[in-house]
Image: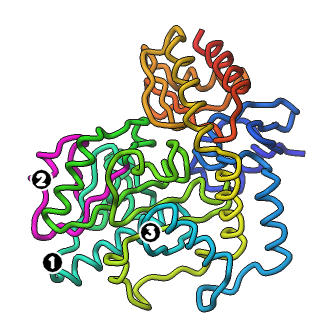
Amino acid sequence: MSSVMEREHQVVMQTYGRTPVTFVSGEGSWLTDETGKRYLDCLTGLAVVSVGHANPRVTAAVTAQMNRLVHVSNLYYTEPMVELAEHLTRLSGLDRVFFANCGATANEAAIKLARRWGQTMKGDACYEVITLDDSFHGRSLATLAATGQPKKQATFEPLPSGFSQVPPNDIDALAARVNDATAGVMIETLQGEGGVVPLDVDYLAAVRRLCDERDIALIVDDVQAGMGRTGTWFSWQQLGFEPDIATTAKALANGLPIGACMATSEKAKAFQPGDHATTFGGGPVVCAAANAVIAEITDRGLLTNCLERSDQFRVGLEALDGVRSVRGRGLLLGAVLESDRAGEVAKAALEQGLIVNAVRPDTVRFAPPLTITPEEVVIALDRFDAALV
């Protein structure tokens, strides 16, 4: 019989350069491939499986909900969705939630909301959104236009209009770009796909002041950095400012597809019935999973564990030969190497049974589960050290 990889090549569109490993099971911080080899997962499906593989609480919640109600559409009310919205508004400090299917669709909702608000408040010409160089906001046409990575955009030009980019950490460049057509500024506080690069705290405060002064919606894309990944529920909560609109997705349901766009009441009221919609967003099963994730993070003290294991990773990585520095926040960290060999090192780490990935030629990303133990961090550091040889 043909292998899974051979079968995949025959029937799946070749949009990914997949790593030649087929995983068949997972538990906690560990994955097992079809040969029985175990790997310590310090990538978690791109910062997704934050409370661990096959988490019993999430599994039980999903199973119970599957046996009760799976889908009715957003034409009707369901309790899991309302419960999750209550959690997210309480945890984020924002007032209203729209549920989407993933990070890109959450960001689409945020962009549409900022445009709708700008045009409602300031007229039809106010619809532009400014983003940052090296940002990543998604693969749909609008979110790709918002993304500040020309190599990802080139294949699909012409892209939708109404987007422009400025350098990060340069408030003068942002201020110079703002004009009467600017409805929103969209940022990641920590550019994950851009190389695990945190924005300066002073810059973020200046962006908030500029948006207040010019009456512009400040959007935070917390798709990767949200849900406890940086040690607080949302990344801005340790950085001294609040957004008007924010998104999250990856870790929200521990691997089930969901996204959320959150906003203040003042911004959210720009959306009226019929302005935006989704068939699957906020379905009972994924919301039940997300509610279980929030309970796990809360009951197990995983925000504290995130910060403690972050310090352990930093100290350990900085001590390794071949690592120049470590950047990031919480358990979204980039090990910056002394040379451009991140791809080679990530491959060697996989052979050692450690899952990480290269996000820049010189940077390897670590995004382990928030449940990772001190003993597992030691194993990860030992295996990464071996990969650096």
Range of magenta residues: 164-188
Q: Nearer the viewer, residue 385 or 81?
A: 81
Q: Is residue 278 left or right of residue 94?
A: right
Was residue 167 drawn as part of the magenta stretch in this picture? yes
Please name the amino acid that badge 3 sits on.
Met
Name the quadrant of the N terminus: top right
Q: Nearer the viewer, mark 1 or mark 3?
A: 3
User: Residue at image x 76%, y 46%?
Assistant: 53
Was residue 364 drawn as part of the magenta stretch in this picture? no
User: Residue at image x 22%, y 52%?
Assistant: 207
- Numbered badge on residue 125: 1
Residue 24 quadrant:
top right
Q: Is residue 59 above or below residue 52?
A: below
Q: Nearer the viewer, mark 2 or mark 1?
A: 2
- Numbered badge on residue 262: 3
Residues marked 2 and 1 touching at CB (< 8 Å): no
The crowding category of the residue bearing disc 2, from other C-alpha atoms within 10 Å (few below 14, some 14 to 19, many at least 20), is: some
Q: Nearer the viewer, mark 3 or mark 2?
A: 3
Q: Which residue is mark 2?
A: 175
Q: Earlier in the sequence, mark 2 or mark 1?
A: 1
Whole-Å distance between the Cαs marked 3 and 2?
Answer: 25 Å
Q: Nearer the viewer, residue 383 or 55?
A: 55
- Numbered badge on residue 284: none
Q: Residue 163 at what x, y percent from top left?
A: 25, 62
Q: Residue 334 at what x, y percent from top left?
A: 48, 30
Q: Is residue 327 above or below residue 102?
A: above
**SS at mark 2 in the image:** helix
Q: Earlier in the sequence, mark 3 or mark 2?
A: 2
Please name the amino acid that badge 2 sits on.
Ala
Q: Residue 302 at what x, y percent from top left?
A: 64, 44
Q: Earlier in the sequence, mark 1 or mark 3?
A: 1
Residue 191 quadrant:
top left
